[in-house]
Amino acid sequence: MIDKLKLAIDKKDWSLVIEFYKQLTGINPDGHEMVPVPSKPLKVAETGRKNDFQDFTMRPVQTSLKKATKVEKAVTPKKPKRGGKKTPVKAKQIEFVDTGEAPDEPGADQINDNVALTPRNRKPFKPVTMECILCKSKETVAPLFKRDKDTYKCNSCLSKGKINGPE
């Protein structure tokens, strides 16, 4: 039956598609029922799976509704009990020998190591004085830690979790 559909697609013949539809549904394309014609069962070739997109054959499916028998249960390997004997791990022979020599990287001979250091031109930072909003103590902090004067808390107030708790 599938062969007729394949043939219809290959030949692009609409009449073969209509015949396939009649056999598949038992109804004519115009909607009237057709007298069912007994068809002989198809034999599916026992071949491996094909990767051809034009192959519409389906492999036969074997369904197994039997429960596992005692023989099948005995075949499964037993798990070792907890705390039981374990097989010791064997050490493998290591073939690597460390000679202490660093491998030469390509282009390493072209690097000039006799270059003077660049002088530091950046100005040192100036500390900023901040006043804690809780204990009113004044601290000098790096500009990195500068905050808005209305929200700054010193380290002791933050760690102690005084009034209003830590930030």
Image (cartoon, helix red, strand yellow):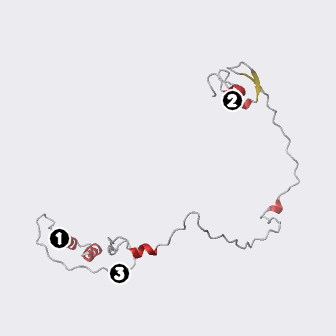
Mark 1 vs mark 2, foreground winner is: 2
Residue 129 appears in which quarter of the rendering? top right
Q: Which residue is mark 1?
A: 22
Give the mark nearer the N terminus: 3 vs 2: 3
Residue 14 appears in which quarter of the rendering? bottom left
Q: Which residue is mark 2?
A: 159
Q: Amino acid at mark 1?
A: Lys
- The residue sitting at 69% across, 29% down in the picture is 159
Q: Amino acid at mark 3?
A: Glu
Picture disc at residue 46? 3
**Which quadrant does the C terminus fall into?**
top right
Left or right, 54 with reference to 153: left
Crowding at mark 1 (Cα within 10 Å: few <14, some 14-19, many 20+): some
Mark 3 vs mark 2, foreground winner is: 2
- The residue sitting at 74% across, 20% down in the picture is 137
Circle 3 SS class: loop
Q: Position of residue 49 (x, y in %)?
A: 39, 76
Where 74 sits versus 108, above or below?
A: below
Picture disc at residue 64? none
Residue 35 appears in which quarter of the rendering? bottom left
